[in-house]
Image (cartoon, grey):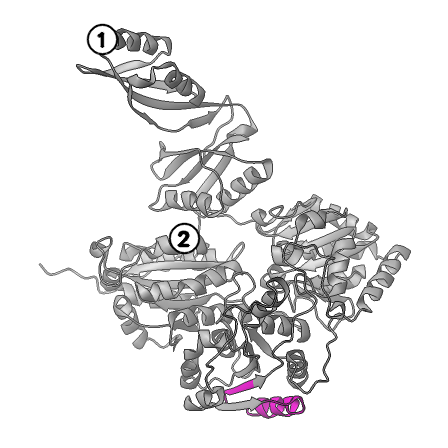
Amino acid sequence: MRHIVSLLMENEAGALSRVAGLFSARGYNIESLTVAPTEDPTLSRMTIVTSGSDDVIEQIIKQLNKLVDVVKVLDLNDGKFIERELMLVKVKATGAFREEMKRMCDIFRGRIIDVADGTFTIELTGSGHKLDAFIEGLDNAAILETVRTGASGIGRGDRILKV
Amino acid sequence: MAETTHPHQITGAEIVIRCLEQENVKFVFGYPGGAVLHIYDAIYKQGHFKHILVRHEQAAVHAADAFSRATGEVGVALVTSGPGATNAITGIATAYMDSIPLVVISGQVPVPAIGLDAFQEVDMVGVTRPCVKHNFLVKDVKDIATTLKKAFYIAKTGRPGPVVVDIPKDITAHLADFVYPESVEMRSYNPVTKGHSGQIKKAVKLLLEAKRPMVYTGGGLVLGDASELLVKLVKALGVPVTNTLMGLGGYPSTDKQFLGMLGMHGTYEANMAMQDCDVLLAVGARFDDRVIGNTDHFYSKDRTIIHVDIDPSSISKRVKVHVPIVGDVKSVLAEMNELVALEKPTQSPALKAWWTQIESWRGKLCLDYNNSNGLIKPQYVIEKLWEVTKGDAYVTSDVGQHQMWAAQYYKFDKPRRWINSGGLGTMGVGLPYAMGCQFADPTAQVACVTGEGSIQMNIQELSTCKQYSLPIKVILLNNRYLGMVRQWQEFFYENRYSESYMDSLPDFVKLAESYGHVGMQITKPEDVEGALKEAFDMKSRFVFMDFITDQKENVFPMIPNGKGLSEMILAEDL
């Protein structure tokens, strides 16, 4: 099953490689991994999207907790949560494509953030499924380039991951 | 412009020395080189600890590791950058797999040169990351003291393990005030010590009500110094007990409640009791593949498992447990003992029947071997070693058949006496391990049980043994084969002995003598005991004993790879 694991870690050189190294060394899946400093600059927050049986997920959580740089770990799937991902898509915007792209962007509540003679760059935020649906909805020939951040997640309501 | 210096400031190298002093380090095992020259200069000027010069960095880490295994203290090794650092890796990985607390200090190229492919540069923090508990790169002289304080703290607390501290050369020349922190506060590292009382109560109730109870303990019990508490618990409950390869000595081997080692080469009675018990108490052990074998086969019988371990990730990793107790084995066993004492248990008819069953398994005499054919049997050498040393030696081993025979036939009654590489299975540890033990206990009898394959993997340390006059006794079980490889080839590869013959062996007697040691070759069974006595009587000499043993002897019992605990091959089956 797909799980989203959030963690807080010391914002130190090499901390990211410890997490990435753990996943490769133990053969765990990583669908995506995002990391950036938090409002407290000594801490980084990471969101890892992984998948595995309950036993594997339990081991992943335990192994992450064991890393000396990791301060707190939360399996977001243990409760209600929200996930969002950002995608930038550069598409062809010539002839009929120009109006079609504008329309698709509106339907998915994206924003065109760069306009050039023959291209648009569209910014779209949402769950991974929504971003997938947008890509599927586009004419494949129109897609010039895509870049996705990977999911970020946060618990709903009172579920707070903080030191 | 001249740098203004504070009168109390000292160099980074001197700070390193002062930190080791504050940690009360007695021995540093190491090898000098460019990046650690400042540190070696500071070592020259100090008088607190003794530096032991090895002949290869791998041996420095193994010796520090054995020093820790024998004493319980943190072992310390010092190596230079680049090849010095990479040579240390096998030692570090060996300690990591067996959870041995080490601080390994490695030199690094100067900070401005890092990343420029400088001479003798290697990314030590990157290279060691998968085989350390934690590691640090120190980039400011002011951080040396706090980093080393943290390194020692992390190495020895929680589930212990090796910690690498990589220090660039320029940092060891920079000046700073020396302040050693009194304590360590880390928000990200707070190992649990006390087990959950409710779970402990539940565990004790299960053990008291068990019809076929069994206790299984591993290296964690030895590391946690909880042997006495284990003996008390096992005696009070009247239950059978087994130790893993790493756990030998955790419970006295000569006691009648001890069923011997379990696992791939464990005894018939220990493995059968593991399989058939209804309540299993596991303490500081991790149900690994060499112990439990096939987990599906293990699950084919119902039993309730209680697992005490300081590392939550060791619990339910390979085998699902029912009563997990995360905590320090010492504190948990102490609490269990208190609860058991309140109950004053007496032997139930069910437990009596269980012992009858166990005695019938024991009656198989699975460790009996045929000792009549004129060739030296390796098992016989170990039995005689046990007799001659009165069961009180530190026994180190390398990896292979000889390791299993030493584990099976030397009856360890005390913890921290059996020193071997259980997890990583590192050939070549035996001799440096013996060095670490001899430094830890200079007047003790130290025997290195080895094979002619393994001993050649760190044979250069004969020179270190000469330099420090270490009276180690090498017990070489020389069968002219990589015995364990040959055994598997005989059983599973239709006798195709691919590259397992050890040809072109040196004359070990002359080799030992060339280093100024005593060399002996023993070829007849009737000479074994006398030679051992003669060797151990030479209390101040290093003696290399080359026992020419039966080439085709195999280790039994044996659970073939992938099979279950009760699917052993016994010597009598063949």
Specify whether residue A141 is painted magenta.
no
- Name the image quarter holding residue B31: bottom left
Q: Residues within 10 Å of mark 1 (few under 14, many from 20)?
A: few
- Name of the residue lying farthest toward the left: B1
* Amino acid on which disc 2 is placed: Arg
Question: Would residue B31 be found to the left or right of residue B457 on screen?
Answer: left
Question: Tag 2, which secondary structure?
Answer: helix
Tell me the distance, in whole angstroms, between the alpha carbons under discs 2 and 1.
54 Å
Which subunit holds the residue at mark 1? A
Specify whether residue B542 is painted magenta.
yes
Question: Tag 1, which secondary structure?
Answer: loop
Residue B417 visible in this rendered orientation of the protein: no
Q: Which residue is mark 2?
A: B129
Q: Which residue is mark 1?
A: A95
- Name the image quarter holding residue B231: bottom right
Residues at marks 2 and 1 on the same chain = no
Question: Would residue B238 be found to the left or right of residue B215 on screen?
Answer: right
Foreground mark, 2 or 1? 1
Residue B365's mark? none
Placement of the C terminus of chain B among the 4 image quadrants: bottom right
* Amino acid on which disc 1 is placed: Gly
Q: Is residue B343 above or below residue B30?
A: above
- Name the image quarter holding residue B72: bottom right
The foreground one among B372 and B259 is: B372
Question: Would residue B221 be found to the left or right of residue B62 on screen?
Answer: right
Q: Is residue A49 above or below residue B290?
A: above
Which subunit holds the residue at mark 2? B
Placement of the N terminus of chain B among the 4 image quadrants: bottom left
The residue sitting at 23% across, 61% down in the picture is B170
Q: Is residue B168 above or below residue B324?
A: below
Q: Residues within 10 Å of mark 2 (few under 14, many from 20)?
A: some
- Magenta residues span B523-546
